[in-house]
Image: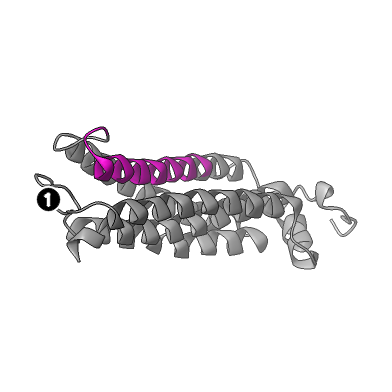
Amino acid sequence: MNDVTRSVQATTAASAARVAHQRKALPNGMWGAVLFVSGEAALFGTLIASYFYLRFNTSPWPPPGIEPPSMALPLALTGALVLTTVPMALASRAAQTGRRARACWMLLLALVVQGGYLGAQIYSFFSDLDKFGPKDNAYGSVYFTLLGAHHIHVLLGILLNAWILGRLLLGLTNYRVVGVRVVALYWYFVNAVAILVVLTQLTPSW
């Protein structure tokens, strides 16, 4: 166990924790995640900028016949999603210190809340589609595009969470430690975007 000098050789919880502790730079997987998140941040920046461009050039907003979105449910759901930052951070820390069981429980807790959030948001999304559509006007187009893009990212995060949780059940290795860190970083990004999206969505109700 003390002979492990390369990350590729860290195939046990103890050796993976030792490699994580001794690492002086971000692993390649984390740099890849940073680049991916940067690109997605640009996407959401463009969508949010498009929303406000259309809003400031369209009056009234939303158009007649469409009620401004209610504030209570979106804010409550977003608050619940953002709180999953805590178990994701704890899971990342637990994986880096070799505590596989704790990492698994934290990922499972986050996964349950994230799944509940997505389920409620999808229900709300289709309820809105019964009232107006993306082809009806500029408001409907950007409203559903923005929310749809965010929901897809949440779904991707849930799939990543489920995948890394399944891998951790088989044991803790260096690559799985990096995987947990990558998934946690992705969720930090998704949760930050959730705040921006809900604030943008609710601007007509302020």
| 14 vs 107, nearest the viewer | 107
Neighbor class of circle 1 (other Cα within 10 Å; few <14, some 14-19, many 20+) is few
Q: Position of residue 162 (x, y in %)?
A: 49, 41
Residue occupying the point 90% across, 56% down: 3
* In this picture, residue 73 sits left or right of residue 30: left
Q: In the rendered image, which residue does mark 1 sit on?
A: 67
Asked which secondary structure carries label 1, the reply is: loop
Which region of the structure is painted magenta?
Answer: 135-160
Query: Is residue 89 shown above or below 38?
Result: below
Quarter where residue 48 is shown: bottom left
Amino acid type, callout 1: Glu
Q: Where is residue 82 in the image (x, y as percent from the top left)?
A: 39, 61
* In this picture, residue 186 sits left or right of residue 59: right
Residue occupying the point 37% across, 61% down: 195
Q: Quadrant of the C terminus?
A: bottom left
Query: Is residue 170 shown above or below 199?
Result: above
| 100 vs 82, nearest the viewer | 82
Quarter where residue 16 is shown: bottom right
Is residue 177 among the parts visible in the rendering? no
Can residue 175 be found in the magenta stretch? no
Residue occupying the point 89% across, 56% down: 5
| 197 vs 119, nearest the viewer | 197
